[in-house]
Amino acid sequence: MSKDWLKKPLFIQYFAPTSLIYISNMTNAPKLLLIYPTTVPTEDTNQSYYEITSNGCLTFIRKYVIGIGPWKDTIIPPNNNHLGLATDLVARAHALNLQVHPYTFRNENSFLHFNFHQDPYAEYEYWLREIGVDALFTDFTSSLHKYQEWTAPRQRKEKKCRGTPA
């Protein structure tokens, strides 16, 4: 691999907590614990993801990861394709200095809750500004990138008057 390739950022993501613990001494790359719906058992410990998102488990796993990547409906369970009430998962993770990167944000109407009127940009805005997540996993990088361009702070260029020294 080229030196330029090695400088590219990456996240190591696993649904299996023991795999993250196992590789923690092998790399300094940031690691995320991915979280299935809370009723699904983990692949390795057979605990439910409800148990894995307890304060005790989050406190333990934070020694090995920089954050969690929950399925977005774990944070805000939908009700008839409308947003339900938000859980406290984001607040609890942030209290433990864990980043939250929910997945998967998609542009297709069948994956957008009715609250967003089929607008993925409104969904990005809600999750980043209202819920306060740190990043988003998406299958549509071009639309998320466009959102980032539109919402990034603008850098002002200072105008110089003609005839003034540089």
Image (tube, rainbow, N blue to C red):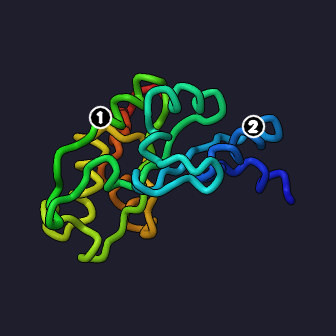
Find disc 2 in the rendering and name its residue.
24
Circles 1 and 2: CB atoms closer than 8 Å: no
Rendered residue at 53%/46% (across/down): 47
* Residue 110, visible in the rendered structure: yes
The quarter of the picture where residue 103 lies is: bottom left
Name above or below for residue 116 compared with residue 157.
below
Q: Which residue is mark 1?
A: 88
Instruction: Give percent across and percent down for residue 76.
Output: 26, 49
| Residue farthest to the front, as pictured | 46
Is 15 rendered above or below residue 105? above
Indicate the quadrant where residue 104 lies.
bottom left
Q: Would you say 42 lies left or right of 157 here?
A: right
Answer above or below: position of 164 versus 30: above
Determine crowd level at label 2: few under 14, some 14-19, many 20+ residues with C-alpha closer than 10 A: some
Outermost right residue: 1
Give the number of callouts.
2
The location of residue 92, given as percent across then percent down, is 38, 29
Q: Give the amino acid at mark 1.
A: Asp
Quarter-wise, where is residue 30 in the image?
top right
Q: CA distance from mark 1 to mark 2?
A: 27 Å
Three-letter code for the amino acid on which mark 2 is drawn = Ser
